[in-house]
Amino acid sequence: MSVLLWLVLVTAPRAPAPQAVLIATPRGETSVPVTTERGTAAVAAPRLGPPLGLTVALDGSRVTVGLSGVVFVFQLGAPFVRAGGVVYGLVGEPYVARDTVFLPLHWLADCVPRAVGGRYRWEPAPGGNTGRLVELPIASAVTATPPSTSSTAPVLPPSPASAPNPITGLRLRHGVVIDPGHGGVDPGNPGRYFPSGLVEKDITLAIGRLLRAELTRRAIVATLTRSTDTLIDLADRGALCKAACDLFVSIHVNAMPDGRRADRVSGVETYFLSDAKTEDQQRVAQMENEAISFETGTSSAATGPLGFILRDLQVNEYLRESAQLAQLVQDSAARIHPGGDRGVQQAGFTVLTTARRPAILVETGFATNRTDGAFLASSLGQHKIASAIADGIVAYLLELERKRAVAPPARGR
């Protein structure tokens, strides 16, 4: 080997060592590689089978994982997992690559220790993004505490208010869950005036992604119920909005049934959850609720008399706030919409029933109207509607902060 070649080999920068997570059990320790090929850390589910006794089943877009007697249900492309009736938010999304299911590392590090009865402990590695999952002896296991599902959980963090954000004027940290309607095998309405074969699910996802970007730019934490073309159960979408979530907004595209005036109706309208008052409100709710016919699994939503009571309490608790949020978003969206202002509406949307916070559904325009269709299918139109919805959300959060401001203490006499 020449001296020059030796110098090149010695001095060339070395590739960083691959990241790995260590699984420590009474049976030994196993190193499992961590990949970031999709932007966030993930692990191949089959590699977790031998050390943890984990089982994986893939059925369409649904991934079912069994671990220590607990069943976790994922949706490909969706940043949440359901276990034992509790929905956990995830950093990252499950996906399939090279015929292998990959699960977010966040699930292993955060959800598993909380959901599996105290059987596991996560130990982060100093200065790195990975760490160790330790299986605890059964005798020392303690009952895990699931995330609070109470509707009275604090919306805003207890930390003191900081200086106002220069873009929004907001002082506190806020979270918003954005729900792009439909997805996967559910295309939504066919989009009579959408070009290139686009359908409702494509438009809602595009607007949802832009809305998340708009809110992130304004320092608001925004989460999508789906970021890819996948189907999420209606009841599971709203259930993502609890605890640190301040509000839930579902994005849809309207359509008129076939008839002489089908292509004449246009405009934006915003709904909150309440009994429908008109036939048109009932029609829209029925159209959007038909998405449930595409669902194949069992929803985590409460059913029967107890479920009815819980949903009724939730609706009444946030009725006024949801109506206010709907009005602010509607006012903002109507200012930029070429189809006109159809006002705030109310109806019984299934997707809104499980949100633990104020929740609205925005019908961004009519796919059966030529002007609305062209507007919603264009990049400019999608940016405009996303920015307008973000403006309405900020206006609502500013009012929320004003209402929650702590009054100064009374001065002593």
Image (tube, rainbow, N blue to C red):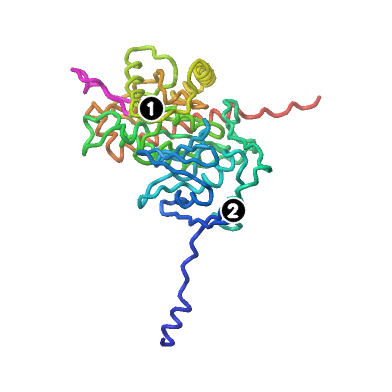
**Magenta-drawn stretch, dominant element (helix, strand or loop):** loop
| Residue 186 position within the rendered picture, expressed as x and y whole percent measured from the top left | 31, 31
Q: Quadrant of the N terminus?
A: bottom left
43 w.r.t. 266: above or below = below
Please give the name of the residue rendered at 50% of the width and 59% of the height, measured from the top-left corner: 19
Region in magenta:
253-268
Q: Secondary structure at mark 2?
A: loop
Image point (34%, 19%), residue name: 286
Q: What kind of residue is marked 1?
A: Val
Q: Which mark is residue 27?
A: 2
Quarter of the picture containing the C terminus is: top right
- Please give the label number shown on residue 217: none
Residue 210 visible in the current orientation: no
Q: Kindly identify the amino acid type of the residue bearing the numbered disc 2.
A: Arg
Disc 1 from disc 2: Cα separation: 53 Å
The reply, left or right, for residue 332 in relation to residue 374 is: right
Q: Is residue 104 above or below residue 363?
A: below
N-terminal-most mark, 1 or 2 = 2
Q: Secondary structure at mark 1?
A: strand
Where does label 1 land, which residue?
A: 362
- Using the rendered image of the protein, determine whether residue 340 is visible from the camera's viewpoint: yes
Q: Nearer the viewer, residue 292 or 355?
A: 292
Residue 15 screen position, x and y as percent: 46, 67
Q: Looking at the image, is 248 positioned above or below residue 219?
A: above
Query: Residue 385: x and y, percent?
Result: 36, 34
